[in-house]
Amino acid sequence: MTGTTDPSRTAAPVPSGPMTGRMLSRLAGWFDSKIGLPFDRLRFRISLRHLSGPRKIDLPREAVTVVALVRDGAYYLDVFLAHYRALGVSHFVFCDTGSTDGTLAQLAQESDVTVLQCRLPWGRFENIFRGYAARRFSADRWCLFADMDEILDFEGQAQLGLSGLLRYLNRHGYSAMMAQMLEMFPQAPLRSVAQQSYPEVQRSFCHYDISAVSALPYHDPASGLGFFLSRNQIPDAPPPKMQFGGIRGAVFGERCCLSKHPLVFIGTDVDPAVHPHVSAGVRVADTMAVLKHYKFANDPMARDQASLAADAIPHGEDALRVAGFAKRPDLTLWSQTAQKYDGPETGPAALRKAGFLQVSARYLAEIAD
């Protein structure tokens, strides 16, 4: 994905020699940070509209606000709101990029929801939008960045709840918690479940496959995210990994990043949502959550075709999936290497034991007490 500080906008390939290329890349980066980014922020503020809900929220410091980018998200709303309310979220800020379904009407009826709208191209402005919403509505508090098709789960959730997790993070001086995205899918061809409702999907999409996940050290420049991650501190034990690919890589050839910073304390030294997956200036916790990702719900074939036609994002993953579905109309993600997600306690614990989640002995000891 591109964004306002995406290195792809500051390191365009050039046909000249390596020294000249580096100089031009640095010049482009300087131009983007000094001129391009401030201009984009100005365009964003001019375009920004408050559609519904409180303009200001007065919440205690321990309260958590969800910030979610949305466009035509009515399909997901009931499950999304119910899950995060049950988790302990106090307020929601939806960053709408141009919904035309029932999303806006439904959200306008929710007392704990604020809706902002910016109709500029979301692929370019999503980072500015999320960052603005986080600073405005979560300053000096914890913010949970979540996409509409993501359900957060973590080991010890039943014992701690979200409030207990935050007490642990605060006690040890952390300002961000990582999560790994886990692609959820059914034991059936995707075409056969394309019209399932999201509550039905929560029951039938109960499998995952991590056999093809690849990993890099957190600060490895090969991740392509070093520009952002270099400002972050990480724990020594266990060191977090940046993970890629998984079932989407194996089936479609995507090099999708699975690692995120969904839970971030919006302090003055933190730069939130500088990339769709990460924030900068944070101290990363020694425990991870899982984001159950329902990418293949809600008729993914039609959505990818629409995304490709709109040319909203340049990473090409939608094109890979469209090509994959065209070759195999009855494509299924299930195979003998698939495993079943058995719930909030056994799921994250099994993923930790498999090395997919990095969780410290200290955290495990504290939730056991």
Image: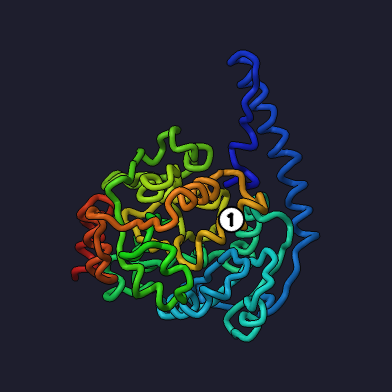
Q: Residue 54, relative to residue 249: is it above or below?
A: below
Residue type at mark 1: give it. Gln
Q: Residues within 10 Å of mark 1 (few under 14, many from 20)?
A: some
Q: Position of residue 194 (x, y in %)?
A: 46, 68
Foreground: 195 or 330?
Answer: 330
Q: Position of residue 305 (x, y in %)?
A: 58, 55
Q: Residue 117's image quarter?
A: bottom right
Q: Is residue 342 left or right of residue 301?
A: left
Eyeballing the image, is 86 above or below 221? below
| Labels in figure, total | 1
Residue at (60%, 78%) from the top-left corner? Answer: 113
Where does the image place residue 363, in percent across and percent down from the top left? 26, 60
Residue at which label 1 appears = 305
**View extreme (right): residue:** 46
Taking depth in this image into account, of 337 and 244 the one nearest to the observer is 337
Q: Position of residue 236 (x, y in %)?
A: 30, 44
Frontmost residue, 43 versus 107: 107
The residue shown at (22%, 55%) is 336
Q: Is residue 356 shown above or below 369? A: above
> Measuring 27% from the left and 66% from the top, which residue is drawn there?
341
Which of the 4 quarters of the picture holds residue 339?
bottom left
Residue 320 relative to residue 291: left or right:
right
Q: Quadrant of the C terminus?
A: bottom left
